[in-house]
Image (cartoon, rainbow, N blue to C red):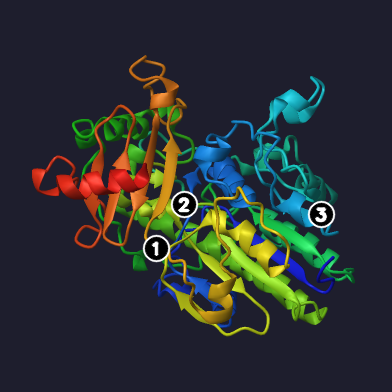
Amino acid sequence: MKDSNKSVLFICADQWRWDCFGFMKHINAVTPNLDKLANKSTVFKSHFTGIVPCGPSRATMLTGLYPFIHRSVRNGAPLDKRFTNIAKEVKKSGYDPKLYGYTDTTWDPRFLNDEDKKKYTYESPMEGFDPVCHLPEGNPVLWANFLKSKGYDIKKPHDLYTREKPKSVEGYVFKAWDIPTEHSDTTFLANEVIKDLENTTSPFFYHISFLRPHPPMFVSEPWHSLIDPNNIELPKESHTYEELLDQHPFLKEIGKKFLNKDSYKEINYKNLTDQDIKNLIAVYLGMCAEVDHNIGRILKSLEENKLDKNTLIIFTSDHGELLGENRMWGKLGWWDAAYRIPLIIYDPNEKNYEINDFTESVDLAPTILDWLNEDIPINWSGESLINYTKKGKRESIKRHVVFEFDFSESHYSQFVKEKKLTPEECTLICIRTNKWKYVHFPSLPSLLFDLENDPKEMKNLADDKNYQEIKNSLLSKLL
């Protein structure tokens, strides 16, 4: 190792929006531990993922490559083996990059034999990581075995994330998780990290990936009752689901998705009342609070074991979460709520800064290598953010960010099934500046939003002739 005393604690939470923190002035969020970390770190307030959903966004963050380069753009789309990643790069320097949680990576099948289980799942750990505590949502075996040791009757590990469905006339079942917080998946993962920190003597590289606040939308007490739903402000809506059927072709398909009862699991979207929406948001914030609590426990262990002085700490998310804005839920489309994510970087012995310049998830892998004084692969798309943590500024300022979304799966749209579009046409890519967002489709009409005057992205200006020059300029930059 070039700098044998340096360690990295790289924490990622799944589906945590950029604004749901105390330090971001959210009136309902309870995040004291991340607030404390933010107060002594560099906080990036205009940070964006390159793609949704989980697997593609993590591939982007860990390879330092834009999605249109690595092409693992759907859960299940293989990541070409020729691409390096942050784990492979730090291994060159002698680190053993340990994984706690998951990366949702689909391996290149050309290099796997037919008996290899990685050939049949998109939830494998990314090549290069040592999965000391692999905890994918689809098969959290280690956690299930822990629960069995505590006397729980567990038939299938994945069933742990299954809950009762609302009745046909209900929107959402507002009920605390029956697994106590001391045995939850979030606490279990944190315990495994803490146990290893207590036995760590050499420089380490830990990538910790929490499932929460990813759905399903339930959480144990005291987190379930922590946020009073009656204090939640309802999100702004522009259309009913039925009205979306007369909108842009993409919105029409999304409207169908939320009206399709066959796709309902824990939420009957059409039947959601205002109280249901408030309850859902309160539970989401409760899940965030439980993760924050356990991150606090990890950071305390880091200090108690005297490992914090030479450790770069990163907290981020893979992507955001729509919480009812424009009647949308989950991660999809082009809305900021799905793509704008948190980023906190604690650089030991440096000052705290607030950065409003654009940054992207592809920047994290180069940042880590730069901090470790290692060479950054020349073909990586991202740029190191270390100058921001050391000086509060950087000469190379991004004037825009780009992100994309593949909606060819039937989970999102029926375009392919109904032979209206080819899979290659079922994609969108956005370019976003401080004022404008342009959304480009290969075969569908484009979209344009004035973010300064329309922050909820409700009014499409793409067909207004007064904005054609702006639209063309953004398309040129995108190309």
| Label disc, if present, on residue 229 of the rendered structure | 1
Q: Amino acid at mark 3?
A: Lys
Measure how far apart labels 1 and 3 are at the Cα level: 49 Å
SS at mark 2 in the image: loop
Q: Where is mark 3, residue-wise?
A: 92
Q: Amino acid at mark 2?
A: Phe
Q: Is residue 163 visible?
A: no
Pointers 2 and 1 in contact (C-beta within 8 Å): yes
Q: Nearer the viewer, residue 223 or 57?
A: 57
Give the side of residue 251 with respect to residue 417, left or right: left
- Label 3 crowding class (10 Å Cα cut-off): few <14, some 14-19, many 20+? few
The relative height of residue 443 versus residue 437 in the rendered view (above or below) is above
Give the side of residue 163 with respect to residue 179, left or right: left
Residue 427 rendering spot, x and y as whole percentages:
40, 33
SS at mark 1 in the image: helix
Q: Amino acid at mark 1?
A: Pro
Measure how far apart labels 2 and 1 are at the Cα level: 10 Å
Measure how far apart labels 2 and 3 are at the Cα level: 49 Å
Residue 189 rendering spot, x and y as whole percentages:
73, 57
Label 1 vs 3, first from the N-terminus: 3
Residue sitting farthest toward the top: 419
Q: Where is mark 2, residue-wise?
A: 174
